[in-house]
Amino acid sequence: VVFVIDTSGSMSDENVGTALDVVEQCSRHLERDQCFVLSCDAAASSAEKFRRKGGFALYGGGGTDMNVGMAKALEYKPDVVMTLTDGYTPWPESNPDEQVQWVTLVITKDGSVPTFGTVIRVTDTVDVERR
């Protein structure tokens, strides 16, 4: 699993904290050596193995382009890619890889979402859409 965390300027500290909490919770149910995290604003970092919350560096603070983050995630040949974002980003026009399970967690009510994969919107409640 590759987790792509939006680290753009529009992501508040609270939103980044929520994203990190989700990664921490998910990693408890996965083999740690199979969990990678990368940060993405207008550029994507190299993925790091997830060890624990705060055990890796997040880079960013500029604009956002999840096209870049998703393309970077595919370099690691994952079965699953989970993007964690406020949704203020452009998305690929189509599914970048049909063999990958795409999951997008959007931490706002009005952020945009991709046209493929599973979308989970986390606000006061959790709404799940399968596309």
Image (cartoon, helix red, strand yellow):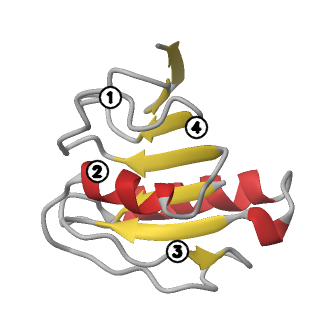
Q: Amino acid at mark 3?
A: Ala
How far across and how far down the image is residue 76, in percent? 57, 63
The residue pinned by badge 1 equals: 114
> What's the CA distance linking mark 3 and mark 2?
15 Å
Q: Residue furthest left?
A: 63
Q: Quadrant of residue 46?
A: bottom left
Question: Residue at point 48% right, 55% down?
Answer: 74
Question: Pointers 3 and 4 in contact (CB under 8 A)?
Answer: no
What element does badge 3 sit on?
A: loop
Numbered disc in front, either 3 or 4: 4
Using a 10 Å C-alpha cutoff, classify the residue at mark 2 as few (fewer than 14 neighbours), some (14 to 19) or many (20 or more): many
The residue pinned by badge 2 equals: 66
Question: Pointers 2 and 1 in contact (CB under 8 A)?
Answer: yes
> What's the CA distance linking mark 4 and mark 2?
16 Å
How far across and how far down the image is residue 109, in percent? 30, 29
What element does badge 4 sit on?
A: loop
The residue pinned by badge 4 equals: 100
How far across and how far down the image is residue 120, in percent? 50, 28
Question: Pointers 1 and 3 in contact (CB under 8 A)?
Answer: no
* Among the two numbered marks 2 and 1 on one chain, the one whose residue lies closer to the N terminus: 2
The residue pinned by badge 3 equals: 47
Query: Image quadrant for the N terminus?
Result: bottom right
> What's the CA distance linking mark 2 and mark 1?
10 Å
